[in-house]
Image (cartoon, coloured by chain):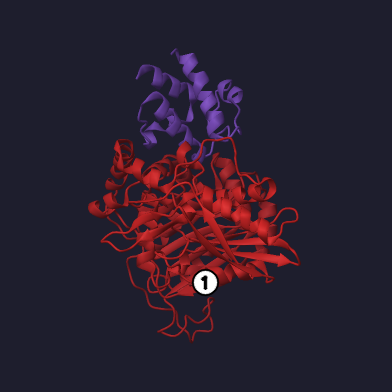
Amino acid sequence: MIIPFTGPSDGTGPLTWGQLAIWDAIERTAPDDHYFNFGRVLEVPGERTPDEAAAALAALLGTHDSLRTRLDLTGDHPRQRLAAGGELPVLLSTEDPGKLLAQLSATRFDYGGEWPLRVALVTDGPRVTHIVLVFCHLAADGLGADVAVRDLRMLLLRGAATTGRPPAPSPLDLAHWQAGPEGRRVARRAAALWESVPHQVMFDRRTAPADPADPADPAGPAGPADGPRVWRAQLSSPALGLAARAVAARHHTSTSTVLLTATAALVGAATGQDRCVVLPIVHNRFRKDTARMVSMVSQEGVFVLDGADRGLDTLVRAAGSATLRAYRSAFHDPLDRLRGDWVQPLCCFNDQRFAEPGPAPCTPEDIRAALPATTLSWPLSQDRLNCRFCVHIGGDLEVSVTADTDHLPRPQMERFLRDLEFLLAVEAGA
Amino acid sequence: MTRDEIRQRLAELVAESSDGDIPAERALHTGTPLSALGLTSLSRMRLIDAVESEYDVELDLDERNWKLLDDLSALAAHLENR
């Protein structure tokens, strides 16, 4: 099925800070850059035919410039290229939505030629039950995708996505603002925070790979020497979720701050470094103008924790202002970062949860009772990644480490996750 | 603006930044630190951005300044005296 769409404007311009940052990550990860694709599945409300779903999708692309924006890669530097209209190919299928999501995410985008949204309509007879959306990361981050999905739902329900609010700026508008005096002022404040952090790489030593012949190796064989170098270990741990909420409640803070701080403390312990530098991915939606943008606005901030062995209780107290500085540093110009050669610890933290469960006084008994439900899996492996050590938080509650096994072998990746669960459980009194 | 008027306005900004989780009346009529009222770091950052734009100030996010960023009365006094 082909869906024609039109929007109110077109144009070209420089990339926004967020687009520049993800483009750099994409280039460093290629050809494995499908890693950055992500998606959402919308359960379609009411009874909608494929034509009605197509009309809603056309309106969505007409509303959000980001979804009509591709890259112009013909010059020395990429530019964003907004089209006034076009045609979106859409897959009609009766397959499982989750399977379609994986299928549509599995290949890299053609950033210059392809629309930054892949869509499948899942049908059951004459009606569409689900819409599967896969986003190119240049067009949206997690929160941007959530805005798009909410708008699409409203379009399906009411035929309009109007909220009464003024429209969010387009990526071209944002790039213009960022290059102007106010944007430069914001960029300079962020730059000052980055420039105050000395150079440091967290996992700076190569380590021997796990012994494939060792039956005691809990992670199993590390694979042949020419196997994938990057692996992801994922811990699904309700106990960790409860413990993080209990610690957050005690400190009047968020579970995100607790998990970031605990991650920094354990990275410090694993690397023997007293000062720990982690780059959290920050959504950069504190400002009213960026709050509802469908765009790639998220960027890395810089989080610094000194005295990583001081004990989690002390560290979480110190983390309040460190977190705020990290948030402020995140809205920065990647070209400043390149010119200034800012710190690159190759160690990042990405809390991808849509809704963070708030602090709650979970009891030690409940946490202990949940411990047996913990499971570990290895859901991803590939050859290249732009980082060396990445912690992702998702779901309720999944924590993963994606790491370069030349610097952190698989048994140590598992160790890190088990230590994180143990540290927080102990801190919560379990 | 008097300090009380600034406090009143700050309480409204707390409510706005926390998406209503902390109503202005609650922020205004308590000596409790904002974190103990449940102001998250994300909401706090929105509050700081809003205060900086509205009062044309730059707030230092250093650890030494934490009390200022966690106490409505201290922040109101700071803005009155700037």
Q: How many marks?
A: 1
Q: Is residue A140 visible?
A: no
Q: Residue at x 40, y 68 (%)?
A: A385
Chain B display color: purple
Task: Using a 10 Å C-alpha cutoff, classify the residue at mark 1 as few (fewer than 14 neighbours), some (14 to 19) or many (20 or more).
Answer: some
Q: Quadrant of the N terminus of chain A?
A: bottom right
Furthest-top residue in this view? B2
In the image: residue A101, left or right of residue A412 = right
Q: Which residue is mark 1?
A: A106
Instruction: Give percent across and percent down for residue A118.
Output: 54, 64
Give the answer, above or below, for where A307 lies relative to A3: above
Give the answer, above or below, for where A127 lies relative to A381: above
The answer to which quarter of the image holds residue A164 is top right
Instruction: Assign a secondary structure to mark 1.
Output: loop
Q: Residue at x 64, y 48 (%)?
A: A155
Query: Which chain hosts label 1?
Result: A
Instruction: Give percent across and percent down for residue B19.
Output: 58, 35
Instruction: Give percent across and percent down for residue A22.
Output: 39, 58
Amino acid marked by disc 1 = Ala
Furthest-left residue in this view? A339
Give the answer, above or below, for where B51 lies relative to A227: above
Instruction: Give percent across and percent down for residue A152.
Output: 61, 51
Observer-nearest of A304 and A125: A125
Q: Which chain is drawn using red?
A: A
Observer-nearest of A241 and A93: A93
Q: Quadrant of the C terminus of chain A?
A: bottom right
Q: Residue at x 49, y 19 (%)?
A: B7
Observer-nearest of A234 and A384: A384
Q: Is residue A259 visible?
A: yes
Q: Residue at x 53, y 53 (%)?
A: A61
In the image: residue A163, left or right of residue A327 = right
